[in-house]
Image (tube, grey):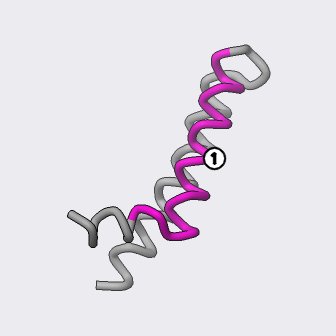
């Protein structure tokens, strides 16, 4: 359990979670539309999982 928490608190994970929250908030208040959100979110998640798969 501690190892999972340590992995979650890496800089890359914090940035990914933070950006997801920011863009989700911007989408809810209407500053960006759903198409822009999906594009940005796909790039962020693709980068996160792409670098995770490369590590292993």
- Residue 42 at x, y percent in the picture: 52, 48
Residue closest to the eye, 21 or 56? 21
> For residue 14, which quarter of the picture?
bottom right
The vertical placement of 27 against 8, above or below, is: above
Where does residue 10 sit, x and y in percent of width and height?
A: 50, 70
Instruction: Classify the position of the C terminus by image quarter.
Output: bottom left
Please name whichever residue, 19 or 49, is drawn nearer the observer in this view of the structure.
19
In this view, which residue lies farthest toward the right? 31
Residue drawn at the location 27% of the way across and 67% of the way down = 2
Q: Residue furthest top?
A: 29
Q: Nearer the viewer, residue 44 or 20?
A: 20
Q: Going by the picture, which residue comes out furthest to the left?
A: 1
Q: Identify the image quadrant of the N terminus.
A: bottom left
User: Is 27 part of what is drawn in magenta?
Assistant: yes
Residue 6's place in the image compared with 19, above or below, is below
Residue count near mark 1 (Cα–Cα under 10 Å), binned few <14, some 14–19, many ≥20: some
Which of the two residues, 33 or 20, is positioned nearer the viewer here? 20
Determine which residue is flagged by label 1: 19
* Kind of element beneath mark 1: helix
Q: Is residue 51 magenta?
A: no
Residue furthest out toward the front = 2
Q: Is residue 3 above or below residue 34?
A: below
Residue at 61%, 58% in the rendered image = 15
Helix, strand or loop: magenta stretch: helix
Q: Please give the name of the residue rendered at 57% of the width and 69% of the height, measured from the top-left corner.
A: 11
Q: Which residues are magenta?
A: 8-28
Left or right: residue 36 compared with residue 44:
right
At which x and y percent is residue 3?
A: 27, 72
The percent coordinates of residue 29 (x first, y second) are 72, 14
Q: Is 19 above or below relative to 54?
A: above
Q: Quadrant of residue 24?
A: top right
Q: Tell me what residue is drawn at x 36 percent, y 85 percent.
A: 55
């Amino acid at each position: 359990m501690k190892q999972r928490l340590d992995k979650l608190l890496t800089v890359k994970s914090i940035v990914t979670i933070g950006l997801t929250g920011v863009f989700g908030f911007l989408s809810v208040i209407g500053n960006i539309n759903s198409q822009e959100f999906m594009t940005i979110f796909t790039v962020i998640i693709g980068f996160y999982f792409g670098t995770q798969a490369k590590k292993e």
